Image (cartoon, rainbow, N blue to C red):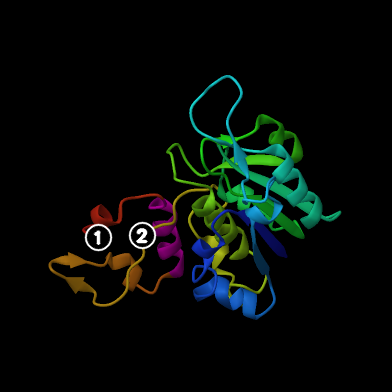
Amino acid sequence: MKVNIITLFPEMFEGVFDTSIIGRAQKNKVVEIKCHQMRQWAWNSYGAVDDKPYGGDVGMLIRVDVIDKAIKEIKNKDSHIILTSARGKKFTQEDAERLTKEKNLIIICGHYEGFDERISELVDEEVSVGDYVLTGGEIPAMMITDAVTRLLPGVLGKDESSKIESFSLPDRHIEFPQYTRPAEYNGQKVPKVLTSGDPKKIREWQKLHQGSNSNKNSKKG
């Protein structure tokens, strides 16, 4: 998979995608991530990508001609284009799974007051990562890229642990509480069933406690 990110601040991604799971995925050529400086498609010699909105509203909008040129230069026949947008559909684990089927993702990061409305016609979908306001679309782009990349075959290894994670379970529940040694700490004990060695009882307990609060469960057997 290739992920192309169009952004005003490509330096924000330095380090984030070079370490841990995403870094290894790139090293192993499972995914190729490239950040493009939006200003290379600026509409004037000063590197401007935005302009004042018609109607006299405050703030600046990213221009449609800038994004159109960027998309035309980067996209190919396999491209799926995402616009990070506060009004977009809320991003879920199901969306991450769906996007793993794409060969080439283009993610456009917003800034300033937003985008010229006509940019919506250039993309395949608008995505929001939550009901709150961020400075720009860079962090949402990181979140989307991370969520999708870690699901690609070969990224997490042979154990395929992503299949039993929170939101990836068949019923989309939060994953059940998990514990490790010591068996007791500050009066809080690991549930006895988890140390019983009985796979059937353990699975029943895990199913019963999906989405539960781990602090409360630590006192139960």
Numbered range of the magenta stretch: 199-210
Residue at position x 69%, y 73% in the image: 30
Q: Is residue 201 magenta?
A: yes
**Left or right: 48 with respect to 1?**
left
Circles 2 and 1: CB atoms closer than 8 Å: yes
Helix, strand or loop at mark 1: loop
Residue 168 on image: x %, y %: 55, 55
Residue sitting at the far front: 45
Q: Residues within 10 Å of mark 2 (few under 14, many from 20)?
A: some
Label 2 to label 1: alpha-carbon separation = 9 Å
Residue 66 on image: x %, y %: 70, 45
Q: Amino acid at mark 1?
A: Ser
Residue 185 on image: x %, y %: 17, 71
Label of residue 177 in the image: 2
Q: Total marks drawn?
A: 2
Residue at position x 55%, y 64% in the image: 162
Residue at position x 38%, y 53% in the image: 209
Residue 120, placed above or below residue 162: above
Q: Is residue 167 visible?
A: no
Helix, strand or loop at mark 2: loop
Q: Which residue is mark 1?
A: 218
Residue sitting at the far bottom: 28
Q: Is residue 44 visible?
A: yes
**Left or right: 195 with respect to 35?**
left
